[in-house]
Amino acid sequence: EVQLVESGGGLVQPGRSLRLSCAASGFTFDDSAMYWVRQAPGKGLEWVSGISWNSGNIGYADSVKGRFTISRDNAKNSLYLQMSSLRAEDTALYHCAKGHCSSTSCHGDFWGQGTLVTVSS
Amino acid sequence: DIQMTQSPSTLSASVGDRVTITCRASQSISTWLAWYQQKPGKAPKLLIFKASSLESGVPSRFSGSGFGTEFTLTISSLQPDDFATYYCQQYNTYWTFGQGTKVEIK
């Protein structure tokens, strides 16, 4: 059974940092692209970042570029999101998602329940 | 950046109705389009990928079509379990989501 379990969320002050983790199981993690997607309270889905299976291809949304860093540890079946210079508008539920790829185009075929990040003083 | 415009934003329908949701891309994405269903407090669930391929385990009343910039998700006969919010997503270049369509009980 595929499982993605996010952790690391919480209440943080503006300008501070936070590191999210996503523990994966039930599939071959080191074959899979992985993604972070967030959802602000009452709002829609927003792609944050993605990373290829070997970390060779990484992308970020303009809204987080230069502040967030995605990484993975295939030996630990884990995905990470290092978030710095946090802003109130980063407040959201952060989901990790498993990618299913056809050549270089990947959709998300399984999502975790998410971890809540609240940025407030 | 590729923008995705989804319509309508809200749809009121009854059980048994045929429902269609439209998604338009700001540039051609071939068939690199997925549809997701999300219920309150739950993670999104994949319904359709590559514009028209039904994900395993998804009921056949869901179907997708389109190519290039215009896409549709159709539910042939709305069931009680289908009242939810639906999102389209392009994955031609990174990911972009539509704004969502909330399907409500009429």
Image: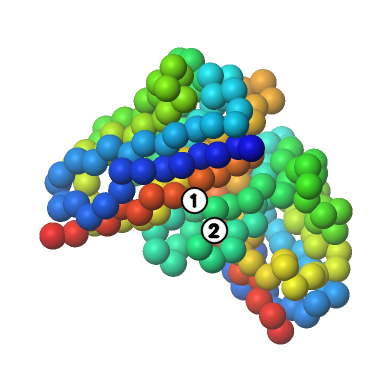
Identify which amino acid the numbered label 2 is placed on.
Lys
Query: Which residue is at the front of the view, B27 or A92?
Result: A92
Residue B29 position by quadrant: top right
Position in image of residue B44 (x %, y %): 58, 52
Residue at 72 percent across and 41 percent down: it is B49
CB within 8 Å, label 2 to label 1: yes
Residue indicated by mark 2: B42
Residue indicated by mark 1: A113
The secondary element bearing badge 1 is classed as loop
Let me know if residue B28 appears in the view: no
- Chain bearing tag 1 is A
Distance between the Cα atoms at labels 2 and 1?
A: 6 Å
Query: Which residue is at the front of the view, B49 or A114?
Result: A114
Q: Is residue B83 above or below residue A32?
A: below
Residue at 59 percent across and 23 percent down: it is A28
Q: Is residue A16 left or right of residue A42?
A: left
Position in image of residue B32 (x %, y %): 68, 36
Identify which amino acid the numbered label 1 is placed on.
Gln
Residue at 31 percent across and 30 percent down: it is A69
Mark 1, Cα crowd under 10 Å, few <14 / some 14-19 / many 20+, is: some
Per the rendering, the mark at residue B70 is none
Q: Quadrant of the C terminus of chain B?
A: bottom right
- Chain bearing tag 2 is B
Mark 2, Cα crowd under 10 Å, few <14 / some 14-19 / many 20+, is: few
Residue A60 position by quadrant: top left
- Please state the total of marks drawn on the protein image: 2
Let me know if residue B58 appears in the view: yes
Q: In this view, does A23 lie to the left or right of B16?
A: left
Q: In this view, does A82 lie above or below B12?
A: above
Position in image of residue A85 (x %, y %): 19, 42
